[in-house]
Image (tube, helix red, strand yellow):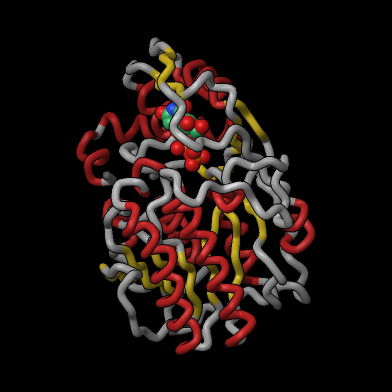
Amino acid sequence: MNEPLSPAAARERAPGSLPVLVTGGAGFLGSHLCEELLRRGHFVLCLDNLLTGSLGNVEHLLGNERFRFLRHDVTEPLSLRVSAIYNLACAASPPQYQRDPLHTIKTSVLGALNLLALAQENDAPIFHASTSEIYGDPAVHPQTEAYWGHANSWGPRACYDEGKRCAETLFYEHIRQNGVDARLARIFNTYGPRMSPADGRVVSNFVVQALTNADITLYGDGSQTRSFCFVSDLVEGFLRLMALDRAPAGPVNLGNPMEITVGELAERVVAMTGSRARIVYRPLPQDDPRQRCPDITQAGSLLGWRPTVTLDEGLALTIRHFDARLSAPDLLMAAE
Ligand code: UDP
């Protein structure tokens, strides 16, 4: 378990009557964040354009009197009264963010500008979901926040990587020029219940393929690595970052440093599901990072945070979730 932050370091924002805004709130991460904020007594305004998020993810919250849903695209300006902002709006899986690359860039850049304006208007603290993609195909391993990255500015991942890099710049210029209270997390690969089965990410792909005995699609030779963080651990990191009395000077990595090859992940999912599926090899997508693993020293010292859910525990929960969805196909459809 993570130890609570000391009272000097944290001012857990007391729930007020103004809502906490969660953009991308109907997405995988956003819906878990909305749930946790509600559990802690906050009013929550969940905003989503429903391009990759889904009402199915927040359907169970709609009856809560402290929860509201607003359909809106963050590329358009917005004027609302809010107490705090979590900006999670952006397609995040490579197939999804590459579907409309220009809209992905606009989501990061115009979304940042619009939400920074809203933070200023409300004098509200703002959390921004940045990403390990800032590091591109990293030449430094594991990645510390001090590493500037190795990203291709015009390849197929650039719409996401460069959009998110520009958003970081916009946030830090607003901190310096306008005194905005912004906190940025660089999020590494995250998994868990409510991932979209259609978004092409490795954990959801492998679990659904294994459960349906379909071919497990391993890209490349499977020797590339990732480090997978369970969603509840990540959300705890978000809340701790926002609870800090003062914003850290720079972005903070949040992820699980337990690194695994994608080939090992495939074998583990097959073993845990008892699947008859076979592993088939597919071409490695262009610019697919060879390795990725967070250095979370800063998250440890600033937030007293570290992941607590092991990969086996998290995969078991994820497999159980997808198993239930597959046996109720309307649930599967509702969340796509
Ligand atoms: N991957 C794979 N099979 C799949 C989907 C993804 O082997 O069906 C690989 C992908 O090439 C990458 C890793 O798994 O090396 C993680 O991919 P994902 O799209 O989940 O996230 P990201 O590349 O953004 O880390």
The quadrant holding residue 178 is bottom right
Q: How many marks?
A: 0
State the residue lying farthest toward the front.
154
Q: Name the residue located 64 percent from the left edge and 42 percent from the top edge.
A: 138
Q: Name the residue located 43 percent from the left edge and 14 percent from the top edge.
A: 279
Nearest the camera: 253 or 21?
Answer: 253
For this view, does 301 lie left or right of residue 11?
right
Q: Name the residue located 44 percent from the left edge and 32 percent from the top edge.
A: 285
Q: Position of residue 180 (x, y in %)?
A: 58, 82
- Residue 317 visible in image: no
Nearest the camera: 227 or 163?
Answer: 163
Q: Name the residue located 59 percent from the left edge and 32 percent from the top edge.
A: 290
- Residue 90 visible in image: yes
Q: Position of residue 188 (x, y in %)?
A: 58, 47
Up/down of 197 relative to 42, above or below: above
For this view, does 40 lie left or right of residue 50?
right
Up/down of 21 relative to 223, above or below: below
Up/down of 36 relative to 140, above or below: below
The quadrant holding residue 222 is top right
Nearest the camera: 336 or 89?
Answer: 89
Q: Position of residue 166 (x, y in %)?
A: 51, 65
